[in-house]
Every structure is written in C-alpha cells, then in structure tokens.
Image: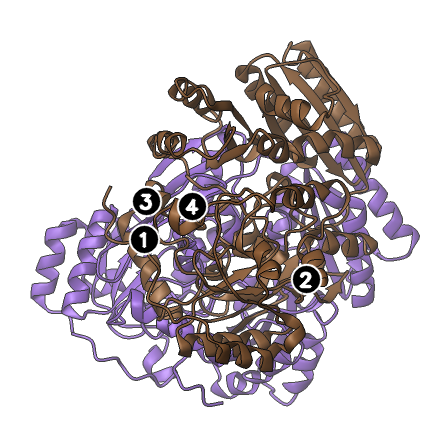
Chain colours: A brown, B purple
Amino acid sequence: MRKATSNLLHTAGHHSWLSEVRCAKYGTASALTKDRYNVQRGNYATLTDRDVSFFEQIVGKSRILTDAADVEPYNADWLHSVKGYSQCVLKPKTTEEVSAILKYCNERLLAVCPQGGNSGLAGGSNPVFDEVVISTSLMNNILGFDSLSGVLSCQAGCILENLETHLEKHGHIMPLDLGAKGSCQIGGNVSTNAGGLRLVRYGSLHGSVLGVEAVLANGDVIDCMSKMKKDNTGYHLKHLFIGSEGTLGLVTKVAINCPVLPKSVNVALLGLESYEKVLETLKTSKRDLGEILSSCEMMDRESLQAVEDNLKLRVPIKDCPFYLLIETSGSNSTHDEEKLAQFLEHALDKNMIIDGTQASEPSRIKQIFELRERLGEGLLRDGFLNTYDLSLGVKDFYSIVPDLRDHLKNFSNVVRVSGFGHLGDGNIHLNVTSKAYSKEILQSIEPFIYEWTAKVGGSVSAEHGIGFKKRDAVHFSKSTRAIELMHQMKKVMDPNGILNPYKVLPELPITN
Amino acid sequence: MRKATSNLLHTAGHHSWLSEVRCAKYGTASALTKDRYNVQRGNYATLTDRDVSFFEQIVGKSRILTDAADVEPYNADWLHSVKGYSQCVLKPKTTEEVSAILKYCNERLLAVCPQGGNSGLAGGSNPVFDEVVISTSLMNNILGFDSLSGVLSCQAGCILENLETHLEKHGHIMPLDLGAKGSCQIGGNVSTNAGGLRLVRYGSLHGSVLGVEAVLANGDVIDCMSKMKKDNTGYHLKHLFIGSEGTLGLVTKVAINCPVLPKSVNVALLGLESYEKVLETLKTSKRDLGEILSSCEMMDRESLQAVEDNLKLRVPIKDCPFYLLIETSGSNSTHDEEKLAQFLEHALDKNMIIDGTQASEPSRIKQIFELRERLGEGLLRDGFLNTYDLSLGVKDFYSIVPDLRDHLKNFSNVVRVSGFGHLGDGNIHLNVTSKAYSKEILQSIEPFIYEWTAKVGGSVSAEHGIGFKKRDAVHFSKSTRAIELMHQMKKVMDPNGILNPYKVLPELPITN
C-alpha cells in the first residue's frame, strides 16, 4: 500500500504542494459525486471476488488494490469536487495487460476508469460510481529517444517532469509544461490534450504528438506509434485519442516531437494598471520578441492576493491590478537579451508598465514562476474552489471576471473572484472561491459563464477538458450534429460504453 | 467554359509552369484509370438528365459543366497518371449548396469526387470512373482575419497564394508553403494534410488548423469552426477531416492560425560532397540557427540536373553530389544575419560544404527557391514521372535512392532516379523518370520501395496522401486493426460510400 500511495503522490520540487494539499485534506469527507450531482448509475455489472481473482491472474496480487484505504486516493480529485467509490485499482505494466483487462471488462460489462496522475480539474479521471480504476502509474518506461530527430517514445504512465529531466540530458525539452508536471502523466496529458505554459511557442499536442498506441474497449490494440514527423497513411486515428479522456480507448504509448533545449531563458514579471495596458504590452511583446517568446501569462491582483494571503509568497514588484509574466527561450543569449531589453524599453517609454523585474538565473526564474504555478493551490486554500477554463478572444479575455464578480455580488460566502491564464493563447482560468462547497454558488455561476462564453464565440473548455463536471456544457461550444457524431464514434469504439462512463459526452437529446 | 478553365488553371508568379505543362499535354491522350489500374466500378447510379436538371436548380446553369471539353481538365491529373470520365462538374458557392448536392447524391447513390486545385500527386482529386466532380473553386471567400490572434477563416476554395497575399497586408503569413501554391486550395491542403516547405518551423496542419466545417455524405453540416487556439469540448472531430481526402466529408470552411510575417528572411544554397556532410550540416544548422530555421531542403545532383537539362535553369554554385537550401525567418535582421554567418563559418571551418551562395533580397531568394520548387516540373519533362513521398529517419533518408537506382539498373527506359525533399522533417521525394508510362517499371518500384520503407519504420506517404494510387500501400505503415477502424469510421460517416470512392482506404481483407 505505501508504495502505491507514494507513487500516486509523487511530486517533485516546488510542486510538492499538490501532495501536501492531498495529505492535509484526505481526512475530510467530500460528498460522493452521485449524491452531489445526482447521477444515475449505468447498467453495468458489479465487481465480484471472481473478477478480482481474474485480475490477479493478469497483474499479480501486488498490483491490484482492493483495501478501502489503498483505493481511496484514486476515488477523489484534489479539488474535493468529485468522489467515487471504486473498490478496485489495477496497475498494469504493459499494453498486453491493459488489453487483457479491457477484454475481460468488456465481456463482463464492468465499467472502467483510466487514471494517470489524477491531477485533472474536470473530474475526468475519478470513478463516478464503482468503476474499476486502471492506473497507468507503473507503465512508466521511456522506450527511446532519437536526438537527431528529437522524437521521444514512452509508455503512458511516465511523469511529465521525469520525461523533462530525461530529455534535458540529451539537450531537448518536452513541448508542454504544466504546474502539475511533478505528478501528471504523459498519457493523461495526451488524453486531455493538455495545453499549459509553452503552447504559445510549441503549439498543441495535436501537432507535437506523432504517435499513439491505444487499447479499445474490447482489448484490441490500435498501433499508431509513428515516430515520423509526417505520416499521411489513411485516417489520422491518433487524434481521436488526443483529448477524448479515455472514453474511446486507453492510451498506452506515445511518441512525441521534442524541441531543442533553449540555450538562454529569460523571464520578466511586469505590473500594469489596466487590461488595456495588458493588451498593448501583449502586442508589443509579440512584435519585439517574435520567435523567442515562449510564455505570456496574465494574472490579476486577486489571484496573486490568494498566493500572498494563503501561501505567504511575496510578489517582488508593486501592487498592481494586472501582472504579466513573459518568458523568452532562444539559442543565443546576447540576441535574446537585446530583444528583451528593446521590448522593455518600448513598454516603459509608452507607459505600458508601472513596475517590473527581470531574471535569467534559474533560481530566480523558478521563484517568479512559482507565483504563477501555485495560484491554484493559493485559491484552493480559501476553502472550496470553482475553477473554469475558457477560451476567449483576447479582446474579451478579461471582461468576464468583473461581470461574474458583479453577478455573484450578493453571495456573502464568496471569498474571491479572480482570473489568470495563458493570455498569449486567449485562455483564461476563471476562479470563484468560497469557504465551502455551495450548490447555490455553483448554480449561479453555471450556466451564466457558459452563456457569456458562447455569446462571444469562445470555448467552454480550453485545455482542462470536459471530464465529468462539464459534459452538460459541451453544447455551448459544439453543435448538436457534432455531438451526435461524437456519440456515433463512441458507439463504434466502445459499443458497451465501459470506458470512462459519465464523462465527456453530453446525453442526447440536448434539452437546454 | 473559358472562365471555368482559367479558374482551374489559375497559377501565379513562377508557378505558371503547372498550367503550361497542363496546356501542353492535354492534347495527348492518357489511358483511363480503370484500364491502367484494372479497377471495378462500384455499384453506383449513373448520371441522368434528371440529375443534371436537379443540380441546375441548386447551382444554376452557369455553374454546372457537362460539355466534354469543359469537363476534361477535371478528369485528369497533371502527372497524366490517372484519368476518369466524369460527365458533370458542379461548382457550388456555399455550404448550403454543397449540402443540397450531397444529400441528393446520397439518396440517388451517385458517387462524387471533391476537387480543389487539382494539384495532387496521388490521384485523390480526380474521378476514377464517372463520379460527379464537386469543384470548390468558387468557394473562395475570405471570411475574416483577426490580426490580434492571427486567425484567418475562409472558404475551402481559396487559393493558397491568394491567402498569403491577403495576410501579408496584415503582417502575417500562412503556416504552410508549397510549390503548387499558385493553384492549390486551402480545402485541398487541409483534406490532404499538406506539409510543404515551412513545416519544420510552423508544424503540421493538425496543429495550425483551429476549425473546420465539413459536409457529410448525407448533407449534414458538421460545424467545428472554432477560432480559438484551445478548444477541448468533446472529441476533436476536425482531425477526421484533416488528411482523409474528402472520403469522410467535404471540407467547406477552415480557420487557421497564421504566424507573424518575419521581418527578415535569408536563404543559403550550399553544395556538399556526401550525405554524411549533409547530416553534419543539418545538425550544425539546427544548433546555430535554432528558432529562426524555417526551411531545410535537400536536393541531389540528379534532381537539379533535370532542372538544368529540361528547364534551362542555372544552379549558381559548383556541381556537387548534394545541395542544401537553408532558409531563416526572424524578427531581427541583425540577429538573424549574425546567426547565419556563425553557422556558415562553422560549416566552412569543418569542411562540411564545398561551395555556397547566400541571399536576402526577395528576387534572389525567389531565384534560388525556384530551383527547388520546379524540380517536379523538371523531372516530369523527362517524359513520365513516378514520384514517391516517404518519411524516413534522417539517418536512412538518402540510402533508398542508390538502392532503388541499383534495383532498376536493367531498365534501359529509366531516364533518372533522384531524391530531394524536406530533410528537416525526414521527408524525401523519390523520383523515377522514363520516356513514357511503363507498367514494368511501376511494378518493379512497388512494392520494393514500400517494403524498404516499412523495414526502417518509415511512412509510405509523408505529405502527399494516399489518394487513388497508394491505397494498396497503406498496410505497409498501418496495422490491419487500424485499417479496420478506418473502415468503421467511413461506414459511420458515409454509409453508402458515395464520397470519393476508390480512394484512401485499402480493401479488406489485406492480402499481401
């Protein structure tokens, strides 16, 4: 048991907060998902001792958890927003084991819930009822890296930060970077089409992922593990597994194109007095920094206040309504510094920024990024966190925050309404904190913000996915016909609906 | 008629060779596809006058071609490798017209062949028998461009070069560039997942294309026209239309992420004495040029010889066994020139290159790129061109050329075996020219090169797609189970199989 738990909770460096939060909170009881959200269990079989015996034959006794205490961490998410009551966690090591497990579950009509690092925000990786959890944590082999092409291939359970460390030795980096990198797994990243801090530079996983191996519900293995940058042989099936959150197949292997490790990284934290100035600075940064811009993050004062209040971190510049965190990555430090200096000179000359600080030493960069990466933790420590992840045109990007704040002004139990996010990609994380979970607050936020987003042509889920919590919001961003087609795909690839049920797909017909 | 033909043949600038070749050759009769490749017509309905009357109601008399001479250019490809005998070309202007046409054809069981700029190399956009051609040429409206986000939306029939010209005014460029840009259409680019000269820098269309609208076989419109850089709402359906060559749906609109126009572009043409030197230079260019490298093309002497022999172009450096064309694009000309100078110094110091020339003025750059972009034309003028498009690991990249040359050494009618391509992406274009089409040569090339490619884990179609000519080769790069899943997708989205039949999907069971 200890081994399993420590594996799940493995986090490194400054990301250890995730495990701290988890440890601190697992004592407190969260409501079960089925009660909190009033869901009906599907017509699946219930786990029997015979099933457990069969699983033991596949993975051995050491890689099956059935003790309630061992299973508990897999049942809940770190936000305490969802909680299932699975009684069995399986830890396969190979594609063949996953295939045998799924074949059996499909024939037995046992529902399964694939789980990676369990760092999701939409409840996609936790069972809703008693689904058998298939944890990919032990599928953590790096299969190869070709330094000439920059292509890494690995099993789905490799932790993002471990891959990053491995690549650094070869002079490369992963094309994505997330706050949860110390615990999230590449299979989960791919299954949720994770975005993160570097997307503005290296693009989406649909571009970076070259190959995927996945197991369908009936145990069939779909091998699309191309390591080639270009491969136009038939339909591009791998993209069906990118972002479908384990509902069409369980991702077992990934091949991914990894950029060259930049020789020079610089970071600037800037304070600004209005969103207009933020926009002006964004435009200037794109112009002056061009190809070396690798992150462009915005934070509002309220978000950073949570980090100061709850985590006692210090923001190294003046209090301002808005902050920008700009990162550059390039191959020539002299050139990069010149570009950055020119950008900052323009921004100061035109009174775009009030205050700022700049860093190029790794420890100082880490300190500045910590402010950004620990925002979620800081906000969660207010008590309960409702967090949303919206794509909005850069022009409309921030106005949803004051609008929502105004909309919630009569709720005395709301602690904070804040916004931060990937400005360079038009992706805002919108947050409402309260002392505890409140159904009334939730019902006041949704569908208000979804309608707001749909009105301006945005997306109700930018990078966090749909999971369990947002499936009723999909129709705000996708047409009924498109949703029907998604159901048709599901029917083909998982006819019995055993793969991660209650997730991603809204029920049809759409009623609202 | 004149209008239709001139639209089809519209090419601009130095790409006018495509239309010249076409005009020069349309007099010569090519064999019909059905005879040359011995194909059986599917059980589709045959066009009647009533059908034509119905189509006239949808698109009007002026946008339907039925005269044999008018229809002919749509029946054949520019390589003279395939030729159908369609008797009807429809030119819808709107998604609604496409929808009405497909709904009717689906009910009537009339097969259709969607066609963009007809610049494909795999016979994907020409009818095999008498399919009704749906040309997207008149769906050429640019719908909008947001200069803040860099997102362009347009109809499928916009010509790539016209989009490029439009974007230049706004300080942006298209993320892809092809030799055929003067005639190819963005809908065709997306449907074939075109790669091209800039992929090494801006990545694949799976990353750049943000939104797609497509019409299914039954006329249903799938609207996935997100303009957001991140959108994780449900399954990522748009990727099913990227690269499926109109067999799952007809792409009618596209939204695409467009990079900022570089302020500085530099080009170097280098001569090298061996493939080992090519590899060494590639590594050095990646290291020294880093983020500003935007093209890395390789050409062998035999390829350039064709351009010299047949087009009377002059290569401005010494005769060498290999040539590299390196392009940089950046935001600061001083920095870019410094980087390029450093790279060239390293390459000269280490005796990687024999000779070279460098350009930064647009006219000189164009002159150098012309050598690369007219290779296809130069080779075609030998008589008949068998061209292959393979992804191979950079290490194995070139050895297939001497191997194939040796394999074909007893064919006295082979004029040239040559290789060139996108070295930076591991994508080679392998060419065999002969005075005329020869079945024996074809049968000696295939499956030899496909087996060669499969053995080293490459892809038998990197960027040109499968079309009609390569469907029997898909299994060299994809497993039977993956191909079965492709068929299942096809069945869901086009149950009657009316969309671009005889293309992309190999017949099951796979026999060889």
Left or right relative to B312: residue A455: left
Q: Are marks 3 and 4 on the same chain?
A: yes
Per the image, label 1 sits on a secondary structure element best described as helix
Residue A439, horizontal then vertical, whole percent: 39, 35
Residue B255 or residue A1, whichever sits in front:
A1
| Residue at image mark 2 | A4
Q: Which residue is mark 1?
A: A483
Which residue position is annotated with label 4? A469
In the image: residue A150, left or right of residue B459: right
- Determine if marks 2 and 4 fall on one subunit: yes
Callout 1: chain: A
Q: Determine the image quadrant of residue B476.
A: bottom right
Does the residue at mark 2 contact the one at mark 1 (Cβ under 8 Å)?
A: no
Query: To which chain does the residue with label 3 belong?
Result: A
Cα gap from disc 2 to disc 1, whole angstroms: 38 Å
Answer yes or no: do the residues labelled 3 and 1 have beta carbons within 8 Å?
yes
Q: Going 77% across and 55% down the picture, which residue do you hit?
A: A167
Disc 2: host chain: A
Q: Is residue B196 visible?
A: no
A475 relative to B81, above or below: above
User: Could you give the CA–CA distance between mark 3 and mark 4, rounded to whole angstroms?
Assistant: 14 Å
* Mark 1 neighbour class, 10 Å CA radius: few under 14, some 14 to 19, many 20 or more: many
The residue lying at 53 percent from left, 67 percent from top is B381
Q: Earlier in the sequence, mark 2 or mark 4?
A: 2
The chain that hosts pointer 4 is: A
Q: Are marks 3 and 2 on the same chain?
A: yes
Give the amino acid type for the residue marked by disc 4 in the picture: Lys
Question: Which of the two discs, 3 and 4, labels the residue nearer the N terminus?
Answer: 4
Given the image, on which type of amino acid does mark 2 rest? Answer: Ala
Residue corresponding to mark 3: A475
